[in-house]
Image (cartoon, coloured by chain):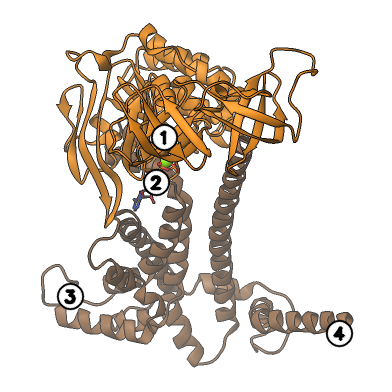
Amino acid sequence: MNQRRSIFLLSALVFGFAFLYVPILSMIVFSFNESKLVTVWGGFSVKWYRALLSNERMLEAAWLSIRIAAVTATIAVVLGTMAAFALSRFGRFRLRALFAGMVTAPLVMPEVITGLSLLLLFVAFAPLPLFPDARGFSTITIAHTTLTMAYVTVVVQSRLSMLDESLEEAALDLGARPAKVFLVITLPLIAPALISGWLLAFTLSLDDLVIASFTAGPTTNTLPMMIFSTVRRGLTPEINALATIMVGIVTVFVVTAGVLMARQERKRELEMRAAWQAAAAAGPRQ
Amino acid sequence: MSAHPDERDAPWLDPKAQPYVRIENVTKKFGEFVAVNDVSLNIYRGEIFCLLGGSGSGKTTLLRMLAGFEQPTSGRIFIDGVPMEGVPPYERPVNMMFQSYALFPHMTVEQNVAFGLKQEGLPRAEIEERVAEMLSIVKLNGLEKRKPHQLSGGQRQRVALARSLVKRPKLLLLDEPLGALDKKLREHTQFELVNIQERLGVTFIVVTHDQEEAMTLATRIGLMDQGRIVQVGTPYEIYEFPNSRFVAEFIGNVNMFEGRLVEDEPDHVTIDSHDLGGTLYVGHGVSAAPDALVWAAIRPEKMVLSREEPPGQHNKASGIITEIAYMGDISIYIVELDSGKRVRVTQPNTHRHADDRFSWDERVWVSWSDSAAVVVTE
Ligand SMILES: Nc1ncnc2c1ncn2[C@@H]1O[C@H](COP(=O)(O)OP(=O)(O)OP(=O)(O)O)[C@@H](O)[C@H]1O
Ligand SMILES: [Mg+2]
C-alpha cells in the first residue's frame, strides 16, 4: 500500500517535472545543435549564439526590451511602494477597499483586456499634452507599469504588514521627522521586498508579449514580439539560442528574488523565536 | 513596600505645587469602543507614577496619548504647562520605552542608542561619549557591536532603556519595562531604575500589570479598570485604604465579607455578614445609607488564629484549617468557616519548632482587631 503510494507519487512527480521542463530542456539542448534542422541533432556548436550576436534587428529588440523592463521596474517600485504604504499605514480611509481592489485588479485581468483598453486610451488621449503622441517605448512602458505595479504593491504590502509599526513610532519618539523615519528606518527594513519587487517587475515586463503587441507602434518591436513573428515563419536554432539566454536571465532574477524573500522570512522566524524565548523567560511570574 | 508617605516629600499634597504632567478629562475612543474614559491625573516632577491595571484596561493607550501617537477624542494634556494638542511626537519633551522594545533590527546596540542624539545634530564626539556613558549605566559594555537579535531578552530591555534615557528627557514613559525579565533580574532592575531615576531627576510614568512591581517602584499608583482611573494614591494608601472591592482585590490578597450595615455611628459601624456568620465591628465611620449592602475587606496578615475562643462578640469566627502553605518567613492558612466561606490567614513563623503550630483539619478561631477591616460600598 505504502509502496504503491510512493510509486504513484514518484511518477506524478516525474511526469509533472517532465511536463514543465522537458520543452525548455530540449530547447536549450537544440540551441547548441550544429545542424540547421531544428529536430535533427548534428553535433555540438555555439554558432547560433554567434549568429545571434550579429543579428542587428534581434539585438535592437533585445536592447529595447531591457530598457523598457528597467524603466518599468523602477517606476513600478516607486508607485507600488506608495500604494502599499497607503494601504497598510493610513488606517481605514474612505474607499480603501475600492483602492485595494483597483490596485490589484491587473493581477487577475486578462492581458488582452488590459492591452486593448490601454491601446484605446493611448489612441484617444494622444493629442493631449503630456501624453506620448507616437506609440512605442513610452506607451509600452506605461502599460507595463500598470501591470507590474500591482505585483510590487502586493510584495511590499506584505512586508510592511509584517513590519512592527512601533519601530517607526520609536524613531519619531526619538526626534526623527517622518521623512527621515522613512529613509533610515522603513526603507532599509523593506529593502529586500523592494529589490524582489523590482526583479519581479523586470521579468514580467521582459517576457510580456500580449500587452506589448497592443501598445507598440507599427515600427516598434520588443524581443518577445520579434521572437513570435520570427517563429511564425519557422523555427530556427537561432531562436532557441535567444530563448535559452532569456531563460537564463529570468531564472537568475526569479531565484534572486526568491532567495531575498526566503532570507527575510528566516530572519523574521529568528526574531519570533527570540521573542518567544523572552516571553518564556518572563513566564512564571511571582 | 515603599516608604511611608510622610517620609518622602509629597508634592501632590502641596496645593501650590505645579504638576509636571496634567491630564484633564481625557477620553479616547476607537470607533464606539472607549479605551480611556474621562481620565484626570496630575503627575509631579521627579515622581515614579505607576499605571496599574489588568490587560486591556487602557494603560498603553494613555501612554501613547502622552507620547503623541494617539490624539485624545476629548480632553487635554499639558506637559510642563504647555498644551500638547497638535504637537507631534518628535517635538515632545518625552521619550517612551515600548512594550515590545522596538529596537531597530538593522542597527547595532550602539547605533540604536545613538539614534536619538543624532537627530539632535550633536557633534560626534559628544554622541559617542554619552552613548558610552549610558551603556555603562545599564551595564551593556562589550555588547556595543551586537545586533538586537543577538541579545537576550534582558539585554534588549536594557538597550531600550538606554535608548530612551540617553536623550535625557524630562519625562520618560515606560510600558511594561520589566516584562521580559526573570524574577531575580526584575528585582535588580527595579532598584536600578529607581537609582537612575534619582540620579538623572527624570519623571517616570511606568505601566505595569504586576502589582508587586508597582508597590516597589511607585511614589504613587493610579489603578485603571476598563479605561477609568479607579483610585490614585501612594502604595500605602492603595493597600491599606482601598476605595472599592476592585482595588482591594487587585492589590495583594484580601478576604471580603459581604453584609448589611446594622449600626452606623460617626466613629464606628457594625455589619451583619452572612459570609461571616456573625457581626463585624469596624472602628471608623462609613458614608453609606443604613441597611446598605457593603463589603468589609480584611488583609490575611491582619487576622489572628487561635485555639481558644477570643473574648468579645464581634470580629471572630470559627472554622477548620483546610490548607497550609509553609513559605519560610510566614505560613498561609486557608480556613473554612462554619458559614462555608474560605478565608486566607497568614501568620509569621516566629518560632523555629513546630510544637505549637496549627495542623490540618484543626478547629480554630479566626479574629481581628477593630481597625483591621476597611469598608467599601462598591
Ligand atoms: N488602535 C486601536 N484600535 C482599536 N482598539 C484599540 C486600539 N488600541 C487599543 N485598543 C483597545 O483599547 C483597549 C485598551 O488597550 P491598551 O493597549 O491600552 O491596554 P493595556 O492596558 O495596555 O493592556 P495590556 O496590559 O494588555 O498591555 C483594548 O481593549 C484594546 O483592544
Ligand atoms: Mg499595554
For badge 3, the amino acid type reads Asp
Could you tell me which secondary element the residue under label 2 belongs to? Answer: helix
Q: Is residue A108 left or right of residue B91?
A: right
Instruction: Check the rendered structure and report the hue given to chain B.
Output: orange
| Mark 2 nearby-residue class (10 Å; few <14, some 14–19, many ≥20) | few
Q: Quadrant of residue A121?
A: bottom left
Left or right: residue A15 compared with residue B158: right
- Judging by the rendered image, the residue that carries numbered circle 3 is A133
Amino acid beneath label 2: Glu
Disc 4: which residue: A4
N-terminal-most mark, 3 or 4? 4
Q: Are marks 1 and 3 in contact (CB under 8 Å)?
A: no
What number is the disc on residue B271?
A: 1
Q: Are marks 2 and 3 on the same chain?
A: yes
| First along the sequence among labels 2 and 3 | 3
Q: Which chain is displayed in brown in the rendered image?
A: A
